[in-house]
Image (cartoon, rainbow, N blue to C red):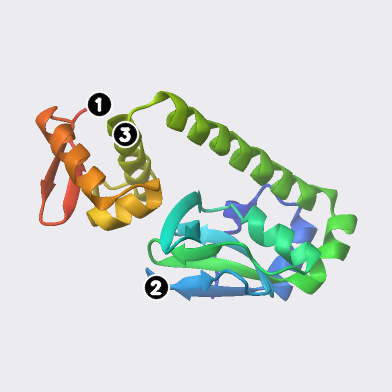
Amino acid sequence: MEFDKNILSFLKPKLLDELIKKSTLKEFSKGTEILREEQYVKVLPIVINGLVKVYSRFDEKELLLYYIEPAQSCVMTFYAALKNTPSKVFATTEEESKILLIPIQYLPNWLQEYPGFNDLFYNQFNLRYSELLDTIRHLLLDKMDKRLYDHLKKKSDLTKINSVKMSHSQLANELGTAREVITRVLKKLETDEKVIQNAGEIKIISEW
């Protein structure tokens, strides 16, 4: 199975050749769990195309942490792999995805031999930290209607589709709230002419 190397053009050619030679490129259907909590990490993923959701579970509720987009990896998986500790997160494909799976035994040598490889993960740490600050800002400053709207908008932008097919329960899990709250807030967003709902599909119809 081949892929466009330009997706990983930020890596040095020699390192990229090593990754392709030693790693496995695999396709996953939508909704596939590729990592679970307490599982020891054997491979480090780099998403080539598609989208992966990384989340935690608390009291049977999911809490969205971040999405892994093409040319990105998972900092939580990276840390668990280097420290040989169990995963603290779950990861599931949000759509059909093609993922490069890097055996973790090569990581220590590659991180020393190819300084540019470190940059990939430094950049991921910086990205996730920035997202964490944004999440805290939303929690402190924004009401649920703005949080839900922004969440739907981000999901729409990531999938490049102007609608989101998710149940109220799924949205509640990702935002750490109750389904009844999501149902009530979506009705308000409809009244405000921000979204419309139809047969399990939520479509954004105007800017905030």
Residue drawn at (13%, 29%), measured in percent from left and top? 193
Kind of residue at disc 3: Met
C-alpha gap between disc 2 and disc 3: 32 Å
What secondary structure is found at the residue carrying circle 1? Answer: loop
Residue 64 place in picture, x, y as percent: 46, 51
Residue 137 left/right relative to 206: right
In this view, the residue in front, 184 or 89, is 184
Mark 1 crowd level (few <14, some 14–19, many ≥20, 10 Å Cα): few
Residue 141 left/right relative to 126: left
Kind of residue at disc 1: Glu
Mark 2 crowd level (few <14, some 14–19, many ≥20, 10 Å Cα): some
N-terminal-most mark, 2 or 3 = 2
Residue drawn at (68%, 69%), measured in percent from left and top? 86
Residue 61 left/right relative to 37: left
Residue 95 left/right relative to 88: left
- Asked where in the image residue 39 lies, by quadrant, the reply is bottom right
Question: Which label belongs to residue 207?
Answer: 1
**Mark 2–mark 3 contact, CB under 8 Å?**
no
The residue at which mark 3 appears reads as 144
Residue 71 place in picture, x, y as percent: 58, 52
C-alpha gap between disc 1 and disc 2: 32 Å
What secondary structure is found at the residue carrying circle 3? Answer: helix
Residue 163 place in picture, x, y as percent: 23, 47
C-alpha gap between disc 3 and disc 1: 16 Å
N-terminal-most mark, 1 or 2 = 2
In this view, the residue in front, 6 or 145, is 145
**Mark 3–mark 1 contact, CB under 8 Å?**
no
Work out whether residue 96 can be spotted.
Answer: yes
The residue at which mark 2 appears reads as 29
Kind of residue at disc 2: Ser
Mark 3 crowd level (few <14, some 14–19, many ≥20, 10 Å Cα): some
